Every structure is written in structure tokens, then in C-alpha cells.
Image (cartoon, helix red, strand yellow):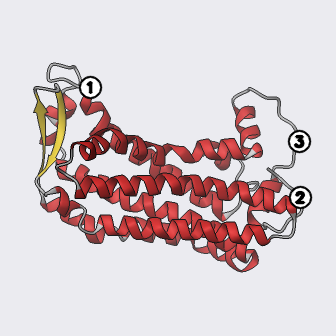
């Protein structure tokens, strides 16, 4: 995020606007998830941090955290599909779509953030308690709403959005295959791989959520829900910067220079933004 914000002119493309949006949301999701699903598992009743769970309900309604967790699931899945759709449209007809993306991206982001309230507002009306489990010596969030009810609208939405993400990436692959320039194909493929890998993680998360809701009495399903799903959720949250670092030599170079691991040079980093905006370029900036 810092690299892109430091060089706004060089990375002036809709892909990076969406990436900044996604990164900001992922940081918020990470902090929320850390509090609700990570820290609570290692804090005992006699820990110095026990007040974060034992006393916090006096000041903050716990149902807000439940609502946030489901709300961010909507936003995160939608954003992943949105980035895939961005890549597909820009590869298809760059001159027509990129200017619309640049002009309306912030409006689209606002819609993505607000629309889930149509469902997640109902969580505010259900009480969530923080209970201490003496067997595991940890705290857990226990919402009064049954698990199946919490996913009534979320799960179908996740399935539809995941299917759309897969379709967008397949279409992007077909469009890249039709590009005439070999260098353009190579560069566009790298950006598509970033969205495709994220889509695969999204697909895995959606599948595990389906198992979690529909196989509540199955021991293996509970194991997947309690141990594998949080890892997949973390992967969906954290994978984007690693993919961009791994597949973009310009991003990698700028980050290494910022960290003092590489001497600054005069490479024209404008080329990467030019490539994202125009996949038909014959020079390969990555």
C-alpha cells in the first residue's frame, strides 16, 4: 500500500485503486478477526488481557462484532470478484472501460460497502455473548442467532459471487490468449494470475462455508470449520500483497528501495501503470 501511495502517478490505474481499497478492508478484517478468532483462544480468565473479553461488553455491544464479521465477508468476496471483473474489462476494451473505472471506482466501492447492510443490520437485533470455556481456557463469541440463519443470505451470495469470479477469470484467460503481442500476453497473464489465485482461495473458502453450514453434526466438517476455514480466511485477507510482490518486478523493486535493500535507480516505473491501463502495449513492464 505504501509503495502505491508514494508513487500515485506511476501507479495511476483502476487496478491499483481497487487494490488499495482491498488492502484497507483486509487490514480492518484482519484486526477484527484477530480479536474474535485468534486472541480469544490464547487469553485465559486470569490473563492480564482478560479484560478485553470479560469487561468489554460493558462498553461495546458484542453484536456489533458479529455484524462486522458477516458484513466484511460480503465486502471481501464482492471486492475479489470486482477486481477480476476489472481485469477482464480492461483486457477486453481498455480505452472504453479504464476511464469509466477511474471515474467511478470510488462510487462502486461505496456501494459494495453499504449494500450488505440490507442483510447484516439484522445481527444488531440479536444478542452476542462472550463466554469463557473452562475446558479450553479461552473465550468465545456466542451469537443467539442460529448458524443456519446467519448464512441465510450470505451463503447464496458467496456462491453466486464465487461463480462470477471464476467466469471473469476464464474470460480473461480467453482474451489474453487472443492478444497478438507476446509481451502483452506475458504481462497481462501475470496480472490475471494475481486475480486467479485469489479466486481459487475464494472458491475454497466458499466450499468450506457450505460444508460448515450443511454438515454441522459431522466431525470432519467441524474440524474443517474450526481449523481449516480460519486459515483460508486469513489467506484471502493476506494473499494480495504477496502476489503483487511476487509477480510485479516494479513493485518489488520499489519496496526493496524503500526498505534500503536496493539502491534507487532511474527505471521508469510509469511503464507498469501504462501496461495495466493498456494491455496492448508491446513493451513488457513487469
The 10 Å Cα crowd at callout 2, few under 14, some 14 to 19, many 20 or more, is: some
What residue is disc 3 on? 266
Quarter assignment of residue 155? bottom left
Residue at image coords 60%, 57%: 195
Which type of secondary structure does the marked residue at label 2 adopt? loop
Q: Position of residue 59 (x, y in %)?
A: 16, 42
Q: Is residue 228 left or right of residue 121?
A: right
The 10 Å Cα crowd at callout 3, few under 14, some 14 to 19, many 20 or more, is: few
Please say whether residue 76 is visible from this viewpoint: yes
What residue is disc 1 on? 42
Q: In terms of depth relative to the viewer, which is nearer, 229 or 42?
A: 229
Q: In terms of depth relative to the viewer, which is nearer, 72 or 8?
A: 72
Q: Position of residue 168 (x, y in %)?
A: 58, 70
Residue at image coords 54%, 53%: 198
Q: Position of residue 42 (x, y in %)?
A: 26, 25
Q: CA distance from mark 1 to mark 3?
A: 48 Å
Q: Please, is residue 170 above or below residue 43 in the view? A: below
Sequence-wise, the earlier of marks 2 and 3 is 3
Amino acid at each position: 500500500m505504501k509503495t502505491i501511495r508514494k508513487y500515485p502517478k506511476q501507479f495511476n490505474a483502476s487496478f491499483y485503486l481497487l487494490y488499495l481499497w482491498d488492502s484497507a478492508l483486509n487490514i480492518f478484517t484482519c484486526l477484527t478477526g484477530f480479536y474474535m478468532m485468534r486472541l480469544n483462544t490464547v487469553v485465559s480468565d486470569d490473563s492480564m488481557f482478560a479484560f478485553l473479553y470479560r469487561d468489554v461488553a460493558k462498553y461495546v455491544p458484542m453484536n456489533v462484532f458479529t455484524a462486522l464479521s458477516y458484513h466484511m465477508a460480503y465486502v471481501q468476496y464482492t471486492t475479489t470478484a470486482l477486481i477480476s471483473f476489472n481485469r477482464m474489462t480492461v483486457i477486453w476494451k481498455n480505452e472504453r472501460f479504464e476511464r469509466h473505472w477511474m471515474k467511478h471506482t470510488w462510487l462502486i466501492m461505496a456501494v459494495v460497502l453499504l449494500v450488505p447492510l440490507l442483510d447484516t443490520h439484522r445481527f444488531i437485533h440479536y444478542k452476542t455473548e462472550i463466554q469463557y470455556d473452562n475446558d479450553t481456557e479461552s473465550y468465545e463469541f456466542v451469537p443467539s442467532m442460529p448458524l443456519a440463519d446467519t448464512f441465510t443470505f450470505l451463503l447464496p451470495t458467496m456462491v453466486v459471487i464465487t461463480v462470477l469470479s471464476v467466469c471473469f477469470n476464464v474470460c480473461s484467460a480467453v482474451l489474453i490468449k487472443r492478444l497478438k503481442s507476446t509481451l502483452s500476453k506475458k504481462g497481462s497473464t501475470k496480472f490475471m494470475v494475481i486475480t486467479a489465485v485469489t479466486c481459487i482461495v475464494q472458491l475454497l473458502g466458499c466450499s468450506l462455508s457450505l460444508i460448515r453450514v450443511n454438515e454441522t453434526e459431522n466431525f470432519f466438517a467441524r474440524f474443517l470449520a474450526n481449523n481449516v476455514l480460519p486459515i483460508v480466511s486469513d489467506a484471502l485477507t493476506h494473499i494480495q500483497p504477496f502476489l503483487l510482490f511476487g509477480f510485479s518486478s516494479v513493485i518489488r523493486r520499489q519496496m526493496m528501495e524503500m526498505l534500503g535493500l536496493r539502491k534507487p535507480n532511474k527505471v521508469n516505473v510509469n511503464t507498469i501503470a501504462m501496461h495495466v491501463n493498456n494491455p496492448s502495449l508491446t513493451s513488457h513492464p513487469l
